[in-house]
Image (spheres, helix red, strand yellow):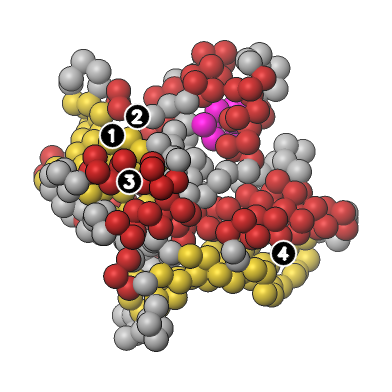
Amino acid sequence: MRIRDIGEFGLIDRMARSLPPPGEGVVVGIGDDVAVLRSSDRYILATCDIQVEGVHFLKDKITPYQLGRKVVAINVSDIAAMGGIPRYLLVSLVLPKETEVEFVDGLYEGMREECSRWGAEIVGGNMAHSPDGIIVDLFLLGEVEPERLLRRAGAQVGDRVLVTGTLGDSAAGLALLLRPETVCPEAHHEFVLRRHLTPTPRLAEGRAVACSGLATAMIDVSDGLASDIGHICEMSGVGVRIRADALPISDAARAVAEAIGADLLEWALFGGEDYELLFTAPADRAPELARQVQEETGTPVSIIGEIVPAQEGMALVRADGVARPLRKGGWDHFRE
């Protein structure tokens, strides 16, 4: 058996089964993007994410500054999905000896700037030689009040599914990077590239959702909407019906998809790296929560589906009203 046979999430499950049960200080362990650890009056949040040259980024398609901002932002997004606040970062760099010093300067400029936006600071790290390719691995610690912690588990049958912002923008940006000859309005071009290269984590939105006390589960959209709602369903023991015509899609993503001839729905469901927040709330409170988050942050929130019993599985309801099975899809490092 090879890793590709079981995929990224199968490998995570296998590793988790090989370890002893979590200790008393562990509130949430392996199985979520963020570990939650007991402290005195607040929970400690611990997460890490990595950017590997040739897998997550192409050196000739992103500046060091943009890469620095992005690696911080995607970790902050994990903290946001727990309703938390980012605090301290550790950075591990694995670099070929031929790497330009100016590359590292630009990388740290981007990381410093992104950290300052969210109130976090770099406090240490490590460096090692890479025989081939750059690796930037960032570890982030944050905190959250116990009563405001949100997890993937907790969604209930009848809950509505909500999402911030728009979906498919990062996939559109990647498509433009790979097909630079594509012609579309400059404003749309800049918007989707920015969404892909320097995403904005929804930290204020995550705090607003958590502080409302109305949400039942939350996750960030990193692997793709279909994959990430699948994580909520698995952890909560439920199914879901997503309405295709309710998915929020920007004019920019539509323009790029039209120019390229791409499937816009495919981008919205499976593109990933949008770093929006996907959450659930009781049906009678969901509209109130959507309005509250938008009023507090300025970020639009859309109600895109409903939680159903587990035996109904995951389904996509298209505009004609017909429900079709929704494959979990999304990014898997070892099956792509």
- The residue nearer to you, when weighing 201 against 70, is 201
Residue holding disc 2: 247
Q: Residue at x 39, y 61 (%)?
A: 82
Residue 327 location (% of width, % of height): 30, 36
Q: What's the residue type where badge 2 is placed? A: Leu
Distance between the Cα atoms at labels 3 and 1? 17 Å
For the point 33% across and 60% down, which residue is it? 211
Q: Main structural element of the magenta stretch: helix, strand or loop?
A: helix
Residue beneath the point at 63% across and 16% down: 185
Q: From the viewer's side, name the closer residue of 181 and 149.
A: 149
Q: CA distance from mark 4 to mark 3?
A: 40 Å
Relative to residue 204, is residue 266 depicted above or below? Answer: above
In the structure shown, which secondary structural element does the residue marked by tag 1 occupy? strand
Whether residues under marks 2 and 1 lie with C-beta atoms below 8 angstroms apart, the answer is: yes
Which residue is the site of mark 4? 93
| Separation of marks 4 and 2 at Cα, in angstroms | 38 Å
Q: Tell me which numbered mark, 3 or 1, is placed earlier along the sequence.
A: 3
Q: Tag 4, which secondary structure?
A: strand
Amino acid beneath label 4: Leu
- Amino acid under disc 3: Gln
